[in-house]
Amino acid sequence: MMATQTLSIDNYQDGQQMQVVTELKTEQDPNCSETDAEGVSPAPVESQTPMDADKQAIYRHPLFPLLALLFEKCEQSTQGSEGTTSASFDVDIENFVRKQEKEGKPFFCEDPETDNL
């Protein structure tokens, strides 16, 4: 029998996003700017490839935490015998929307290409 792990949107908030971005060592996307916990923008890196810039734009997008949560939940439901319902996904999305609105965070960035992705 497989152990159940509870997922929370709190696991995918700013701290993890910034950690991923820091590990990529890419420069800040001017269209989707965000600062770290101390309010400091990460320093730009000289040898950034277009692919690295695209990755950074995705990781910094305001909806990335929700995408990561839903992806992990899908992965777990395909590997386990427990029945994950679509209603549980709806609850996760509703909780994310409420939290974004409560904190005054945007749902989109200023780069339409990243938003459409």
Image (cartoon, rainbow, N blue to C red):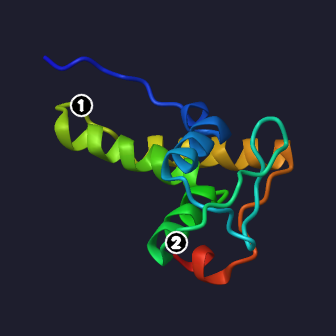
User: Closer to the observer: label 2 or label 1?
Assistant: 2
Q: Amino acid at mark 2?
A: Asp
What mark, if any, has residue 54 been given in the picture? 2
Q: Is residue 82 visible?
A: yes
Secondary structure of the residue carrying numbered label 1 = loop
Q: Earlier in the sequence, mark 2 or mark 1?
A: 2
Percent across and percent down for residue 116 are 57, 79
Q: Which residue is mark 1?
A: 82
Count the numbered circles shown. Answer: 2
Which residue shows up at 65% across the image and 45% down it? 96
Q: Is residue 71 left or right of residue 66?
A: left
Q: Is residue 85 visible?
A: no
Which residue shows up at 68% across the image and 62% down it? 28
Viewer-proximal residue among 25 and 29: 25
Secondary structure of the residue carrying numbered label 2 = helix
Which residue shows up at 32% across the image and 39% down it? 84
Viewer-proximal residue among 46 and 58: 46
Quarter-of-image position of residue 53? bottom right
Neighbour tally class for label 1: few under 14, some 14-19, many 20 plus, Cα within 10 Å: few
